[in-house]
Image (cartoon, rainbow, N blue to C red):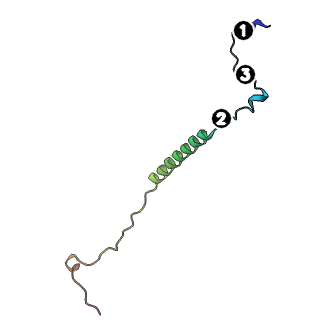
Amino acid sequence: MDTSDLGRIPLALPRTEAEGPAAPPPSRVWLWFVAVFAFQWAAWIAWFVIASQHQVQEVPLAPRVSAPAADRGKKTPDP
């Protein structure tokens, strides 16, 4: 018997046929979740940086009234 292995705890016991198949590897779903979250943050940051450098022209919701202030409340006769 080799005395160099005495007192050393084995990392894993050898599996036997009676114990069944080995456990599957750990899931990496959390890694995909973190990657998608980081990608979404990067997309939002890029969107805001680009939007801050390109100002949008204001579009009026109603046409401007060109009549003088005194005539604004009066109705015009129908022709």
Q: Is residue 71 above or below residue 17?
A: below
Q: Quadrant of residue 55?
A: bottom left
Tell me how far mark 3 sits from mark 2, CA to CA.
19 Å
State the quadrant of the N terminus.
Answer: top right
Tell me the kind of residue under disc 3: Leu
Q: Is residue 45 left or right of residue 67?
A: right
Q: What residue do we see at 26% from left, 78% from top? A: 67
| Residue 57 picture quarter | bottom left
Q: Which residue is mark 1?
A: 6
Disc 2 packing (10 Å; few <14; some 14–19; many ≥20) = few
Work out whether residue 77 or residue 9 is closer to the camera in this orientation and state it: 9
Q: Position of residue 39 (x, y in %)?
A: 56, 45
Task: Work out whether mark 3 precedes mark 1 in sequence or the reverse, and give the earlier one.
Answer: 1
Q: Amino acid at mark 1?
A: Leu
Of the numbered discs in the image, which one, if any, rests on residue 77? none
Residue behind mark 3: 13
Distance from disc 2 to disc 1, alpha carbons, whole Å, reads 31 Å
Q: Residue visible at 60% across and 42% down?
A: 32
Quarter of the view holding residue 12: top right
Residue kind at label 2, given as amino acid type: Pro
Q: Mark 2 and mark 1 in contact? Answer it, CB < 8 Å.
A: no
> Height in image: 2 above or below 51?
above
Is residue 62 shown left or right of residue 70? right
Identify the residue at horizontal 69%, vertical 34% (top origin).
25
Residue occupied by mark 2: 26
Work out whether residue 42 or residue 4 is closer to the camera in this orientation and state it. Answer: 4
Q: Secondary structure at mark 1?
A: loop
Q: The residue tagged with tag 2: helix, strand or loop?
A: loop
Which structural element holds mark 3?
Answer: loop
Q: Which numbered disc, 3 or 2, marks the residue closer to the eye?
A: 3
Pick the front one: 39 or 60 = 39
